[in-house]
Image (tube, rainbow, N blue to C red):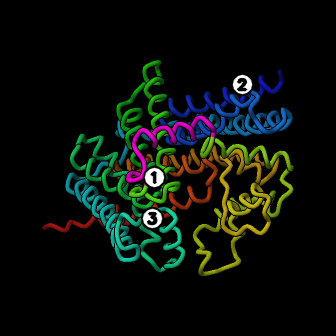
Amino acid sequence: MANFILGMLQLLSIIIISIYEYNKRSIVVFLWATLLIMFGIPHLLSIMTNTSDYSDDIMIKASIFVIMFNLLYIITKKFLNTFIFKDSNVSPNTRNYPQISVGRRNRLKMLSLLVLTLGFLILIYYTIKHLGSLSNASWGKFRALSAELGFKSLLRYAKFILFATSGIVLVYLKEESWKMATISIIMIVLYTLITGNRIIILPVIISIILKYIYINNKNLNFKTIIVIGILGFMVIYLVYFLRLLRIYGGFYNMVTNNSIVELNKKNFEMILSGDGELSLRNAFYHFIYYNNNFNNFNMGHTYIRLLLIVIPTSLIPGIKPPDFAISMGSAWSMNPYNTTYSMHPTLYGDCFANLWWFGILLGIFWALFSFFIDKFIIKKNEVVRMMLMVLFSTAFVIAGRGSVYNGFFIAFAGTIIVAGINLASRINYIR
C-alpha cells in the first residue's frame, strides 16, 4: 500500500510542477513533461501492474527520492517567482522584448537560415566524400567517421549548428511563413534521417508544440490537455520510429527491406514492451539497489564537468572528471572495463548517481538554473528569444532523459552561435 501511495504522490508532484511551469509559460515545462513521460507515469504503472524487476523497497526509495527532489524544486521556484523576479513568461506574445528594426529582423532570419543550410550542407559533403552516397549513411558509420576525423572536422560541429539555428522554424511558424518553415523543417528532417541521430528532430517537434501552446496562448483546459496528450503520443511514436534507423543500419536499408506495416508493428512492439527510452529509469533502480557502490559515483562528476564546460577535454586532458555517462554505463552493464557504452538514467537517476541521497538538493539547482534561463531569454529581441526558446527547450528534454552534460553543452554551444548571428545582424549589408 505504501508503495502505491508514494507512487501516486511522485506522479502527482510531477504533474503539479508541469502545470505550474505551463501556467508561468516557462520553457522548463519541457523538462517536466519529459520526466512525466519517461519516469512518472511508467514508474506508477510498474507499481500498479507489479511488472518491475525490482522489489517494493527499491520502488519506494525511488518514489521518495523523486518526491523530495520535486518538493525542493517547487519551493525554490515558487520563492524565486514570488520575491525575486515575478515575470517569467518567455512567450513572444508578451511583447516585453527589446524592439529591433524590420531590416535587422529580416537579416537575423536570413542569417539564421543560411547558417542552418550551412550545417546541412556540411553533412551532405562529408557523407558523399567519406561514405560514397547518402544511401550508405547510418548512425554507426557516422559515429565511427566522427571519431576518426576528430575535433578538427567540421562534421563534428554540424549538429551544434543545426541545434542553434533550428529555432528559425518557430519564427517562421509564428509569422505563418509556411514556405520558409517547410524548407527549414525538411533540412532538419533529412539531417535526422541521414545520420540516424534522433535528437536532431527535437527542435522541429518543440517548435510545433511551442507554436500551439505558448504563441497561440492556449490555456490549460480539457481540449488543450487532449491535444498535448496526442502530441505526446506522436512524439513517443516518432522517437521510437527513428530508433529503427539504428536497428536496420540507416534509412535506405530500413525502407527497402521492410514494409510500412512491418515497421509500424515493430515500432509498437518496442513501445509496449517498455524498451528504449521508457526503460531508462531501470538504471535508476539499479543504482539504488547497489547503493551507488560503483566507481566514480557520489562525486558529483556531472556537475564538476559542467563547471569546466568551457575547457576542451582534448586540449587539456585530465582536468575534467571522466565522462560520467560512461561511468553509469559501466555500472549498469556491470562492466568496469567499459570505455564506450553510456547510460542516461533520467534526470532523477543522474542526480542520485552523482550525489547519492544528497542528490535531492539538486532540485534547488535545477530551480535556480531554469529560473535564470527564463530571465536570460526574456531580455532578448523576439527572433533571438524564439531561437533560444527552442534551443533551451531541446536541452531540457535531453537533460530530462538523463543526458545532462550533453544537454548543457548543446545549449552552451548553441547560445554562442545564436549570439554570433545576432551580432552579425547588426551590420547592414545592403546600403
Numbered mark located on residue 340 in the image: none
Q: In the rendered structure, which amino acid carries the disc numbered 3?
A: Ile
Residue 113 picture location, percent across and down: 28, 58
Q: Earlier in the sequence, mark 2 or mark 3?
A: 2
10 Å crowding of disc 3: few (<14), some (14-19), many (20+) = few
Q: In percent of the image, x 79 and y 47: which residue is there? A: 286
**Considering only order in the chain, which callout, 1 or 3, is on the residue closer to the N terminus?**
1
User: Hey, what amino acid is under mark 2?
Assistant: Met
Q: Which of the labelled discs sits on residue 391, or is there none?
A: 1
User: In the image, is 77 to the left or to the right of 253?
Assistant: right
Residue 8 is tagged as 2
Q: Where is residue 145 in the image (x, y as percent from the top left)?
A: 49, 73
Secondary element at tag 2: helix
Task: Give the vertical position of 41 relative to 92 (above or below).
Answer: above
**x, y percent for residue 256:** 38, 53
Magenta-tinted stretch: 254-274
From the image, give the main secondary structure of the stretch colored magenta: helix
Q: Residue at x 75, y 54 (%)?
A: 332
The local secondary structure at tag 1 comes to helix
Determine which quarter of the picture holds residue 317: bottom right
Q: Which of marks 2 and 1 is in front?
A: 2
Read off the residue under disc 3. Answer: 416
**Which of disc 1 and disc 2 is earlier in sequence?**
2
Task: Between residue 359 and residue 191, name the one nearer to us.
Answer: 191
